Amino acid sequence: MDEELYIELEDTEWKYDFIDHDRQIVRAIVCDENNFYFVRVKRNDDFGKATLIETAGGGVEDGENLSDAIQRELKEELGVQVKIVCKLGVISDFYNLVHRHNINHYFLCVVLSEGDKQLTQAEKEEFQLSTLKLSYEEAVEEYEKASITRLGRLIARRELPILRHAKRLIDKKQVKN
């Protein structure tokens, strides 16, 4: 496999005041033979009103290892069981608006089976989380469309390099079910 990416990004959308906490996050580029899996997020909060595409994932719980965390998050948000192919890398970014430093651990995962999601009430009601199954080209287009918002630009800057890295690995036929 290729080496892992490590990227450090700054929040150029909101003014920096201070950062008061770090958040360990797991995220995944999830694929099957035909599609990549993402979540669609609709939000209207401090970050503004926006409909966005994002990789599935979330915070690592106390005492949880990264592999267990990504399996749990993908089951909750996408309803899928996956095989972890490899770690793609780490992207360090900031959300100045909420004074947070995000340490995003990205994995490439292949879907083994699909089942029911286990979304929280907030994910259902506040974010209206839904699953998107897209081709690589459709996913890139979705990130570009979402970049009209400040948060959409932050997310696209974080996720497009990882998506491109995963696509290169897949194209090299290094990823198998």
Image (tube, grey):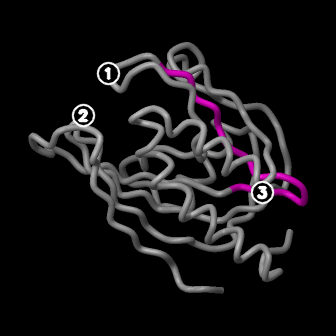
| In the rendered image, the vertical position of residue 31 relative to residue 170, given as above or below | above
Q: The C terminus is located in which quarter?
A: bottom right
Q: CA distance from mark 2 to mark 1?
A: 9 Å
Give the mark nearest the N terminus, 3 or 1.
3
Q: Which residue lies under the disc numbered 1?
A: 46
Q: CA distance from mark 3 to mark 1?
A: 32 Å
Q: Disc 2 residue type?
A: Val
Q: Dot 2: few (<14), some (14–19), or many (≥20) neighbours within 10 Å?
A: some
In this rendering, the count of numbered labels is 3
Q: Main secondary structure of the magenta part?
A: strand
| In the rendered image, the vertical position of residue 130 relative to residue 164, given as above or below | above
Tell me whether the residue at label 2 lies in contact with that at label 3, contact meaning CB atoms closer than 8 angstroms. Answer: no
Q: Which residue lies under the disc numbered 3?
A: 31
Q: Nearer the viewer, residue 42 or 74?
A: 42
Q: Residue at x 34, y 61 (%)?
A: 92
Q: Which residue lies under the disc numbered 2?
A: 98
Q: Disc 3 residue type?
A: Cys
Would residue 67 be seen by someone viewing this image from the given angle? yes
Give the mark nearest the N terminus, 2 or 1.
1
Tell me whether the residue at label 2 lies in contact with that at label 1, contact meaning CB atoms closer than 8 angstroms. Answer: yes
Q: The N terminus is located in which quarter?
A: bottom right
Q: Place residue 144 in its image quadrant.
A: top right
In this picture, which residue range is highlighted in magenta? 30-43
